[in-house]
């Protein structure tokens, strides 16, 4: 990978890392708590519209579109935003969500029959050990419930990865946008039930600038721009050269949270985080041609989701990403990705 493209990959990692701080700012704008499920619905309105009018429906069945929408979009981000609203630090969330890479390996083995390599299994064991250390350290200073909810978000993302991998859509971007259309109404309705009409209507009638800017950043920069660049890189290079850049996401996320929010992880959280990242690195860094092919097919980068992740097969170039990139003012083209923010 040349220097320019390496810098673009690093830029995507920065966009996704900053995404967690942007979410935190939006949820707690000017001391006002935004209902997290409503906030996710707002984000996906911006992810879907107007882009759905520029992008064809992916060539997969509605069952796959619904599955990706429920698990990868609604489940992942609904749980992530809920955890952060309950007090999960933004930086630590960017780290723990990395567990989706390891969970994808396990789910793909169980549901798709894709046997993980010894290197991947070693990465899973190391990552689980890191999560255990993080949990112990976190339990000493705060309730564990938000951490458990983030792990649920990682599991939901991993399930979405497997569904997307099985669907083998020719347009990963189309799958993201069309499946995202399933998110706003159900989560807005759920927010009405959980938070109450007064909280929802009060938030919508008095949206804070920070909340609006946060929704715009997460939808446009973290999801659409980040995805466009990432997809272009995967169209030009093997994922083994691109995916390791996602290890920068929690580094950026935790650093930004420290600078912007004053979050300082405990020594146990740092030690566990290093173990977790070591496990993810062991799973995604290639060690041989045959194992690399299997890993490339099932692994997805951390989200920020920024992200909206999908472990998909590399295919021929299509024009959906280019049309969306043109509409968004981006130069990114598109070929079927193996991973998706």
Image: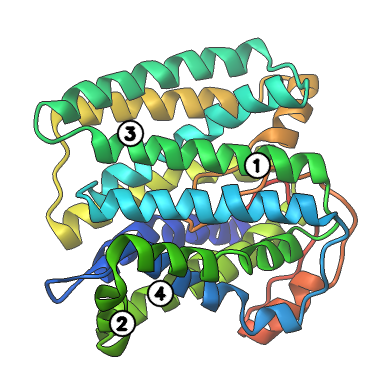
Quadrant where the C terminus lies? bottom right
Q: Where is residue 294 in the image (x, y as percent from the top left)?
A: 76, 27
Residue under label 1, please give it: 161
Query: In this orientation, does residue 115 appear?
Result: yes
Figure quadrant of residue 16: bottom left
Q: Residues within 10 Å of mark 4 (few under 14, many from 20)?
A: many
Q: Is residue 48 above or below residue 64?
A: below
Q: Is mark 1 on a helix, strand or loop?
A: helix
Q: Mark 2 points at which residue?
A: 201
| Element carrying mark 4 | helix
Dot 4 and dot 1 residues touching (CB under 8 Å): no
The residue that appears at 17% across and 38% down in the rendered structure is 265
Q: Nearer the viewer, mark 2 or mark 1?
A: 2
Q: Earlier in the sequence, mark 1 or mark 3?
A: 3
Q: Which of marks 4 and 2 is in front?
A: 2
CA–CA distance in space, label 2 to label 1 = 34 Å
Compared with residue 170, is residue 118 higher up or lower down, i.e. above or below? above
What number is the disc on residue 148? 3
């Amino acid at each position: 990978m040349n220097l320019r493209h390496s810098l673009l990959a690093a830029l995507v990692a920065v966009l996704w890392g900053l995404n967690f701080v942007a979410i935190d700012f939006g949820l707690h704008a000017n001391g006002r708590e935004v209902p997290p499920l409503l906030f996710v619905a707002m984000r996906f309105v911006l992810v879907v519209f107007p882009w759905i009018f520029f992008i064809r429906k992916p060539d997969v069945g509605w069952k796959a579109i619904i599955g990706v929408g429920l698990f990868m979009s609604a489940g992942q981000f609904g749980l992530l935003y809920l955890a952060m609203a309950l007090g999960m630090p933004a930086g630590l969330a960017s780290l723990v969500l990395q567990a989706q890479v390891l969970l994808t390996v396990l789910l793909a083995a169980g549901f798709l029959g894709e046997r993980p390599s010894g290197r991947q299994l070693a990465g899973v064991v190391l990552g689980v050990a890191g999560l255990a250390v993080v949990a112990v350290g976190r339990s000493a200073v705060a309730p564990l419930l938000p951490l458990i909810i983030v792990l649920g978000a990682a599991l939901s993302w991993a399930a979405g990865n497997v569904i997307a991998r099985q669907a083998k859509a020719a347009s990963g971007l189309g799958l993201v946008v069309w499946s995202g259309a399933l998110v706003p109404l159900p989560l807005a309705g759920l927010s009405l039930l959980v938070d109450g009409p007064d909280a929802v209507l009060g938030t919508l009638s008095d949206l804070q600038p920070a909340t609006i800017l946060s929704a715009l950043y997460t939808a446009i920069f973290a999801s659409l721009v980040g995805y466009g660049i990432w997809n272009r890189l995967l169209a030009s290079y093997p994922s083994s050269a691109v995916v390791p850049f996602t290890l920068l996401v929690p580094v950026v996320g935790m650093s930004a949270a420290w600078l912007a929010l004053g979050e300082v992880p405990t020594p146990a959280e740092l030690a566990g985080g290093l173990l977790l990242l070591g496990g993810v690195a062991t799973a995604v860094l290639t060690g041989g041609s045959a194992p690399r092919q299997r890993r490339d097919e099932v692994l997805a980068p951390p989200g920020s989701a920024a992200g909206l992740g999908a472990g998909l097969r590399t295919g021929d170039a299509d024009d959906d990403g280019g049309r969306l990139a043109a509409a968004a003012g981006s130069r990114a083209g598109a070929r079927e990705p193996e991973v998706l923010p």
